[in-house]
């Protein structure tokens, strides 16, 4: 059982259950034993629930966890990693994506750690405490889906739910040496409680060990739900079927950010060089990028994020009957909520328009013949715990530290494009930075095809450390 849980992905584990090699109960008991043993050191899973019987779906019997941010999971409190929400009512329904996970046969065992309101590139909320990286428990597991990545990299789970409003699937995937795909805007429903996340910047999927798991899980959760305001274009086939076909020779633009003053550490530089060499060896054409836009953070995203945080605070205040007190919010969350409350309607509308125009520019860039953009996922290896935590309400200073660590991911949130972090390079300490690929809107299948090709050429699970 230990060998199976260590080496398998979620699809492989489901296949072993279906074939009778192991039973659902044996898998569940072994998983819960691992959580009991490993979670106290890592603090990846913050809520444990009594599992329900599994539906007879594609992933029947595979243990799974839901991130404690935005998405309702009946029988739990969605705390958003915040003390202000810790005593909120227990969810009486599932979010659409959670319902689809259950229908696929996944066994939900709990919820994973998230920074307060999903605002940070590290998962160290005051409510639950820091989440450690299994590669080095003194380092950050990334954010905001740090609990998910820590749970998967440590072997407690084969895959876990995640979300991404500025890099929050790709950042922790990079930090913990896992595969993380951010889908296109509108690919996965935010129903029934919202039409979109953070005005379209945020999306949801999973952090996985393998490309196959990401493809299968995206098939499971994709598609229109009742009342959705829009949906991403349907692929020509399933994502699982797509990865069986190698991609055509691709034209890939490479951007290291140096022209904008971005500084890479040796591991990030190594990740970029390794991806270039591997892609060239597979017959793809790599060239220096001249991107029409550079970053998605600040400007429009700052306005959109703070506006949405202020709206969330207003909803919570109306529900609980009191504004947040001095000990309810961490400094950055409190400052961002205050800033968001002062943003005017015209300023918000302009930020949405500016984001959409960024998407237009990138759409035209890809239409000119560029299939994918390649960057490092992060500018450096994961920092020590505590280094990225805000200790004051100086949002500008905190944002500068966040941006220096993660200068590449947010662009795809602004434009709505799909993007992925692929673990292709490790240093002699066992630390890693992912290789980050961005595709045209709606082109997750192309990303997954390339990822499967890279994975076949250089397997990344079990981790080569």
Image (cartoon, grey):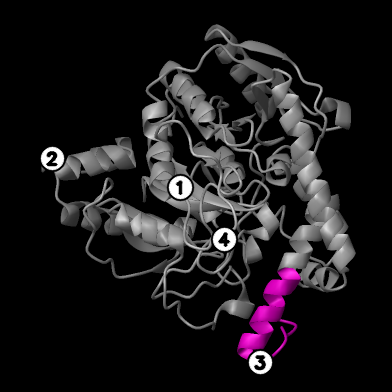
Q: CA distance from mark 1 to mark 3?
A: 37 Å
Q: Is residue 434 left or right of residue 329?
A: left
Question: For the residues carrying marks 2 and 1, which lies nearer the camera in this image?
Answer: 1
Which quarter of the picture shows residue 344?
bottom right
- The quadrant in which the N terminus is found is top left
In the rendered image, which residue does mark 3 sit on? Answer: 321
Q: Few, some or many C-alpha atoms within 10 Å of disc 4 (few <14, some 14-19, many ≥20)?
A: many
Q: Which residue is mark 2?
A: 19
Residue identified by numbered label 1: 222
Left or right of 173, for residue 30:
left
Q: Are marks 3 and 2 in contact (CB under 8 Å)?
A: no
- What SS does tag 3 mark? loop
2 or 1: tag closer to the N-terminus: 2
**For discs 4 and 1, the disc positioned in front in the rendered view:** 1
Is 186 colored magenta in this rendering? no
- Judge whether residue 24 can be spotted in this image: yes
> Percent position (x, y) of residue 70?
56, 65
Badge 3: few (under 14), some or many (20 or more) residues near its Cα, within 10 Å? few
Q: Nearer the viewer, residue 367 or 436?
A: 367
What residue is shown at x 74% (from left), y 39% (from top)?
Answer: 359
Front-most of residues 166 and 348: 348
Position of residue 3 relative to residue 56, above or below, is above
10, above or below 314, in the image: above
């Amino acid at each position: 059982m230990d060998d199976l849980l260590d080496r398998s992905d979620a699809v492989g584990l489901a296949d072993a259950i279906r074939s009778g090699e192991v039973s659902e109960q044996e898998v569940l008991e072994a998983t819960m034993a691992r959580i009991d043993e490993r979670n106290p050191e890592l603090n990846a899973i913050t809520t444990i629930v009594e599992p329900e019987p599994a539906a007879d779906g594609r992933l029947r019997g595979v243990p799974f966890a839901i991130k404690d941010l935005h998405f309702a999971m009946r029988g739990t409190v969605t705390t958003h990693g915040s003390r202000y929400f810790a005593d909120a009512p227990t969810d009486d329904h599932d979010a659409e994506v959670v319902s689809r996970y259950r229908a696929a046969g996944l066994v939900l065992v709990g919820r994973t750690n998230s920074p307060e309101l999903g605002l940070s590139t590290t998962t160290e909320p005051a409510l639950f405490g820091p989440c450690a990286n299994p590669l080095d428990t003194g380092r950050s597991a990334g954010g905001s889906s740090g609990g998910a990545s820590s749970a998967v990299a440590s072997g407690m789970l084969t895959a876990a739910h995640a979300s991404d409003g500025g890099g929050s699937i790709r950042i922790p995937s990079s930090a913990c040496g896992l595969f993380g795909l951010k889908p296109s805007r509108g690919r996965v429903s935010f129903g029934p409680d919202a039409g979109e996340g953070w005005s379209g910047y945020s999306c949801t999927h999973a952090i996985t060990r393998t490309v196959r798991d990401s493809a299968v899980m995206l098939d499971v959760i994709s598609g229109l739900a009742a009342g959705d305001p829009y949906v991403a274009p349907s692929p020509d086939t399933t994502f699982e079927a797509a990865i069986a076909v190698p991609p055509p020779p691709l034209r890939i633009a490479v951007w290291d950010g140096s022209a904008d003053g971005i500084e890479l550490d040796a591991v990030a530089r190594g990740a970029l060089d390794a991806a270039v060499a591997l892609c060239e060896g597979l017959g793809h054409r790599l060239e220096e990028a001249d991107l029409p836009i550079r970053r998605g953070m600040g400007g429009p995203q700052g306005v959109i994020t703070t506006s949405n945080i202020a709206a969330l605070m207003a909803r919570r205040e109306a529900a609980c009957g009191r504004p947040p007190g001095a000990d309810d919010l961490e400094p950055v969350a409190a400052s961002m909520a205050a800033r968001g409350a002062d943003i005017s309607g015209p300023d918000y509308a302009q930020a949405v328009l500016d984001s959409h125009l960024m998407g237009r520019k990138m759409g035209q860039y890809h239409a000119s013949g560029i299939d994918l953009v390649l960057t490092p996922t992060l500018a450096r290896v994961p920092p020590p715990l505590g280094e990225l935590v805000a200790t004051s309400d100086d949002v500008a200073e905190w944002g500068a530290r966040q941006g220096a660590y993660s200068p590449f991911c947010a662009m795809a949130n602004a434009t709505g494009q799909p993007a992925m972090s692929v673990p292709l390079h490790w240093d002699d300490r066992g630390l890693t930075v992912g290789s980050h690929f961005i595709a045209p809107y709606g082109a997750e299948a192309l990303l997954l095809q390339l990822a499967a090709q890279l994975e076949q050429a250089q397997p990344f699970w079990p981790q080569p450390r």
